[in-house]
Each structure stands twice: as C-alpha cells, then as structure tokens.
Amino acid sequence: MKVIKFGGKSLANGNGLSNVLEIISQKNKEEENLVVVVSARGNTTNQLEQILEQAKNKEDYSKALEQLKKEELEPYYSLELEEVFLRLEQLFQGVFYLGDYSTKIKDEVLAFGELLSAKIITKLLAKRGVEASFIDSRQLIITNNNFGNAVTLEKETAQKIKTYFSNNKLSNVKIVTGFIASNLKGETTTLGRNGSNYTASLLANYLSAREVESYTHVDGIFTANPDLVPDAKKIEQLSFNEANELANFGANILHAKTILPLVEKHIPLRILNTFKPEDKGTLIKKESVAKGIKSISVLEDVALISFEGRGLLGKVGVDARIFKALADNDISVSIISQGSSERGIGLVVKTVKATKAVLALEKEFENDFYKKDVNNISIVDNVAVISIIGQELNEFHKPFNALVKNQITPLLFNNTITGKNVSLVVYKDQLHKAVNVIHGQVFGVTKKINIAIFGKGLVGGTLINQILENTQSILEKRKIHLNIFAIANSKKVLLNKEGVTSNWESDLDNTALTNDIVKQTLAYAQEYHLENLIAVDNTASLDFVNNYIPLVEAGFDLVSSNKIANTVSFEFYKKLRKCLEENKKEYLYETNVGAGLPLIDTIKLLHDSGENITKIRGVFSGSLSYLFNKYSSSAIPFSVVLQEAIDKGFTEPDPREDLCGNDVARKLLILARELDLENEFEDITIENLIPQEFRAIEAKEFLSGLEKLNNTFQQKKESQKEGHVLRYIGDLLGDLQQPKGELAVKLVSVSKSSPLGSLKGSDAIFEIYTESYGEQPIVIQGAGAGAQVTARGVFGDILRLAKNNN
Ligand SMILES: NC(=O)C1=CN([C@@H]2O[C@H](COP(=O)(O)OP(=O)(O)OC[C@H]3O[C@@H](n4cnc5c(N)ncnc54)[C@H](O)[C@@H]3O)[C@@H](O)[C@H]2O)C=CC1
Ligand SMILES: N[C@@H](CC=O)C(=O)O
C-alpha cells in the first residue's frame, strides 16, 4: 500500500491537474491499494478566506464566489457540484447576516477547498475510466476542539481509520481530503500549516503504508532555497532526524509534525515534482547516506529582542523570569544567546510577537529598570535567521571567516549540541549575500568570485580575455567561478551580474557614459548582493588610486598592476594598509615590479622570515632592458628600438615615464617599502634619460620626434670602454639601523660578460643580497614587461585571493 499526496500548486488548473490525473492512473496500474491525499486546489483556501472576510464586512462577495466556482469547475463544467456550492453559499450568507464568524465556521468554510478538490479529482478519474472512492477525512481523523490548528486524538483516529478501511468496500484508488478533520462532536476542524501532508503521514502510519510520496511543485529538498542561492543542489537522501531539523529551521516544504508519524514505522517519504514525474526527488528515510552539512535554511519573519542589564551578573532566575513572561503571553523563543557575563541576552521571536514580547518583559522587569539592573529592552526587527543544518562547531570558523571577509558580522549565533546545527542572526539586507557566502563555503560547490576590472587597455584587455578563456577549467579544477561583473574604462562601465561575455568590448562601447564608474560599480554590487568582491586596477592613473579606500570599505579585495598607490606618499601607503587591516581585506600587486616574475612575494617572505636584505640591484625595467640590450648589440638607431619597445607593449602608457626613470624609481620604492623602509619618492636619485630640451614638450610631439634622441645615446654608446654595454639599473641599499634606504636609478656601463651585461630581450634581472647569502645574491630573472606576462601575473593574484577566500 502506498500513500501519495498532491499539494495545491500541483492541483491547479492547467498542466498540474492533468499531470496529477496521469500519475494517479499510472500508479493505479502499479500499486495495490493506493491512498491519494489532496490539498485544496491552487489558491482556493485564500479565496475562501477572502470571501469570508467580505461576508463578515457585509460587502458584496457574489463576484468573488462566482469566480471561485468558475475556477473550480473549469474546464469541466458538467461536474455537478451544485450541492457543495449551495452549502457554501448558505455559510457565507449566515456570516453576512451576523457580520462575524467564529474559528469553527472558518474551519467549516475552508474545508470546502479540500472537499471540492477531492470530489473533482474523483469525478475526473471516473471520466478517464479510473474508478476511485471519495473519502471525507472528517470521518477518519478525530481531533480536539482547537479550531484552526487542531490536535489529533491518536486513539480515536487510529480506530476510525482502521474501521473505515476494513468496513467499507473501497476502490483500489481512494481520494482523501487532506487538512480537514472533525472533533468528537463531528464538527469540522482543520490541522493547521502543512495539514494535508500531516493527513498523509497519519494515514500511512495507521494503515502501515510501504511509502509516502508527496508531490509538490519543486524537485525536492535543496541545499538552500534556490530562489536565494542559484548554486543550490538537490539533496538525494536525508534521514528522518536531518529532515526534522530542516523542518524546524525553516525549510517550508517540510513540517516536523509530518515526519513524526512516519518515524515510528520507518515509512520512507519521497518529495517529488508533479511537473517532472520522472525525477527521483528527495528521499527521507531512517538512514542517512552521508555525514556532514545537509542544508541551509532561512527564517525571515523573525525579530531579535535585545535584553540588556548591567546589574544582572550573578542574579539567579533572570532567564526563568524572561521565559515565564513570554510564555504567559504565548510567545515562543526560537533562539536564545547569552554571554557568559550575563549582561545581555538576545532572543529571537516571531516578528508579529515582538512588540508584545517587549511589553511583557518591560512589565516583568519594571522594578529592575528603576534599580538600573536592567537598562535596555529593544527590538531589532530587520533581521533573519540562517541555520546551517549539520554544521559541526569545530568547522564553523570557515563560513564565519567567509562572512566576516564579506563584511557580514552576525548579530548573534547559537548552536545545538545534538543536532549539529548553527544558527546565525543577520540583518535582512545582508541575508542574500550571507546565504550565498555560507553555501559556497560549506558545500564547497562553486565559490563565486565577483571581479570588477578597471582599465581595459593592453594589460586589462589581455587579462579579461585570459580570465574568460580559463573560467571553465578553473571552475572544474578549483571549483572557483571567476565572474567578471564589471569592466570600466575612465568613462564607461559595463555591468552584468551574470558575468560579461566574450563580446565585452562591443558591449562596453554600447554602454552609456557615466560620471562615476566606481560609484556605479559599488551601487550595483550592493544592489545584487554580490559576494567575494575583487577590484582590479589596470590603469596607470593617479586619480583612480583615490578609489582604493572606498573600494576596500565596500568589501573589495584589491589587485593592481598600477604602481601608483604604492608610490604616492608614505602616509597614504600606511593609511591604505590600516584600512585593509580594519576591513580584513587584502591588496596584491605582484606585477608592480618585474611584471609576471615572483619577486614581491619572494622579498616579502625573506624579509618576514627575518632575513636581512642589504641590497637589491638590477635591471628593473622590461622596456629599458629591451631598449639597451638591442641598442648595445646592434647598429639600429636608438629611436627605432624605442619605437619597437613601445609597439611591443613593454613601455608605460606614456613611454616618457620609462625614459625619465620614474617607472624604475617607483619599482625601487615599492621594494624598499616591502622592506619596511620609509622612503618617499623624492628620496630617490634618478638619472633622467630624456635630454633637458625634450622634457617639457607634449607627449604627442615627443613621440613623433624620437629620432631627436639618437645623437645623445649614440654618444653615450660610443664613449664606453671596449666590451661594455649600457644598462639602466635600480640600486637599493638598506641598513637595518636606518629608517630609510639609499635608492638610485642610473644608466651604467657594464661588461658584456657580466650578469647584467649578458641580459637578453626584455628580461629584467633582480640581484637580492642578504646577510646570510653574503656576496652570492639570489637572482630572479625573466620577462620583465609585456601585456601577456603582466596580465598572467595579475590573474595569479586574483586566484591567490580567490583561494584565500576560504
Ligand atoms: N605593460 C607592462 O608590461 C606592464 C604594465 N604594468 C602596469 O599596468 C597598467 C596598465 O598598463 P597598460 O595596459 O599598458 O595601459 P593602457 O594605457 O593600455 O591601459 C590603461 C587603461 O586604463 C584606462 N583608464 C585610465 N584612467 C582610468 C580611470 N581613472 N578609471 C578607469 N580606467 C582608466 C584607460 O582608458 C585604458 O583603457 C599600468 O599601470 C602599468 O604600469 C605593470 C607591469 C607591466
Ligand atoms: N613599463 C614597465 C612595465 C612594467 O612595469 C617596464 O618597462 O618594465
């Protein structure tokens, strides 16, 4: 024997109803003894409630009633249900004349939803040639007199069900009304929320069914509400205990009282989708398949009551008084959290009860207020509870850290010892983001990293394409979903929370101009609750650096190929780091020196591990390396080689920044500051390669007259010793005793056979001298410039942050 149950949405007109009839017809062939429990169809219960209110208010309800009749019978108008509707009309008339109704009358009226539904299904099955017995569950389920939410009388119900099923000659298919019951006097009662599922479970228990199938409009139970968490996954199997916890913590597809009758006889319950009958849904049975976290549920209709009392420390019976005052007012507390200082207690109650709860507590603690033992009882009502079902406390630091990294600090958290559940109270406007962060963290499904890229020139554009090309493989290998939700140049920003596509360039072109790309990006991230945010600066802009602090404060980690933020004043350098620390955010800039070479990390590691770095020397600039390597070893004019370096994307957006020594100086300063030296840019001795007469002219004019530089450099080349070549180097000398280092950028002539002299292509070379390594430097050498290598380095920083977001 099997009990199957159909919910209201499954039974609504259209696809639902025809699928239900098909499922029953099919099961009739497969199953001996099929009990089908039905809810009221579609929106019927709400409609009945509304008509009842209209009648009570002496309003004309005839149109609404006609509409209800039409919807119930459509498209099968020949279904002869006049008698049922007549009785319903009489009840409404009575309420209309009285101008009032009791909960008893309400139950009687609402019962028509299930009665109509069961009668209609029975008649429609008959039309299809499936004989079915209609059963009014008021003859089976006996309850107390608590109309609206009646409690079942077990003994009487068990006896009624057994006798009814053995004394009546019933068809193989029995269509039973869900939700409705009767009291000992035979008056109609209803079973409250989830009542039809409860009817199905009671019947399954008393008739010792093999299984219960509950047909809904969803595929089963998910790891989180898919409306909130697009990555939520269907759970294949749950144990009764786990299902019970889920039901208690807000999974509205389940109700704890539905599960209890099944537990006793270990009757499995399968949640299925009427609209996808082939899907296996979620099976709830005695055993669990796997340990660990099962689901994340959310309760939104809650308020947090904050009870604070400086004089409560050590006082006995305070909690008892709180609970008694609330219980006397029929207020149930779902979560409580009390600090060991006993000075404050947080209580979660239903929103509708919050004001009443505060009044009850104020009354109870009136004297304590006067004595100043209690100083505040207040409501925080824009909150929601997130429960992680199956969360072990010793692993809770992971979702908790992820929340904090996303600037979500729970107002209260609490765990159950046996159920391994942790509940958190968060502000409602952070709920969406919080659930997604926790879900990504605990299920390790895919962690979404939302990236905003500012600057889409050589490096930025290359980076975007590198990310787009690798998104799928990173998703598969690392379970990290790199989602570029924003791309901006200085005037426009392309925003797409689902992620930009390979058409991003034309999409950005077609975007309207904006006067604040960052403000717009921040507002968008907030509006769509985007989590795990990273802002990437691929501009060379000084102005853009002013956005770093607002971005960090808005929850972004930073990655930058732009060197400016690290080379403006030391004061800003410290301010940014303080802000990062306060907001628990990170800032990575490995490409600032040596493009894709792993230089900054190495220096940081050496320095942090106590190694005294005494000197760093080398060719820091990829473009100037290329320029002097090629110029020194060939007869090609200086201007031609310089143009090649520009064309290859080795130079700064304004190549004069390389030639004047600023770019190398910035790199030197960045390294110095990594070593905790407090140098300012002005402290650097820079040999400017641009002859004086060309320094003040416009970039365009300078770039169109590069050949004017040829004489100067030809002279420098020719004035060298035999076997020597020109190299433009950076030199850093540090002394532990001094707050500042000695930094110099200069053009030198070195032996062709020396490490610097034998450099090739656009390679940069960094010789790092330390106390332990003595005269033998650690050498890092490789491509020091170029859009591909730089973008790859920026990509590496993004991935590092994405992994750190654990
Ligand atoms: N080319 C290389 O080998 C390396 C470059 N870098 C750095 O990478 C950065 C980018 O260099 P490129 O891509 O070559 O420059 P680029 O000139 O090709 O691109 C810069 C982009 O930034 C945009 N931009 C400028 N100001 C902006 C603002 N305020 N807001 C938003 N966007 C703005 C521009 O519209 C342009 O699209 C520079 O800071 C450079 O120092 C770092 C290491 C190596
Ligand atoms: N213009 C720079 C690019 C990298 O920072 C260089 O030439 O090294």
Image (cartoon, grey):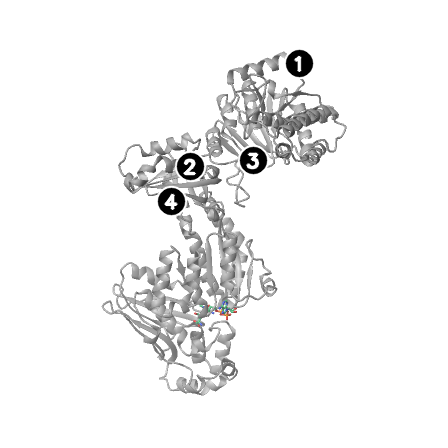
Would you say the residues marked 3 and 1 are in contact, meaning their CB atoms lie under 8 Å apart?
no
Q: Is mark 3 within 8 Å of ligand 1?
A: no
The numbered dot on residue 220 is 3
Would you say the residues marked 2 and 4 are in contact, meaning their CB atoms lie under 8 Å apart?
no
Residue to which mark 1 is pinned:
169
Residue positioned 39% across, 85% down in the render? 716
Name the secondary structure under disc 2: helix
Amino acid type at circle 2 is Ala
Q: Nearer the viewer, mark 1 or mark 4?
A: 1
Q: Is mark 1 within 8 Å of ligand 1?
A: no
The numbered dot on residue 357 is 2
Nearer to the camera, 351 or 77: 351
Name the secondary structure under disc 3: loop
Name the secondary structure under disc 1: loop
Residue to which mark 4 is pinned:
397
Find ligand 2 in the image and state its quadrant: bottom left
Q: Residue furthest top?
A: 167
Q: Nearer the viewer, mark 3 or mark 2?
A: 2
Nearer to the camera, 113 or 287: 113
Q: Is residue 587 visible?
A: yes
In percent of width and height, residue 373 lies at 29, 40
Name the secondary structure under disc 4: helix
Q: Which quadrant holds the N terminus?
A: top right
Amino acid type at circle 3 is Gly
What distance separates the C-alpha of mark 3 from that of mark 1? 35 Å
Amino acid type at circle 4 is His
What distance separates the C-alpha of mark 2 from that of mark 1? 54 Å
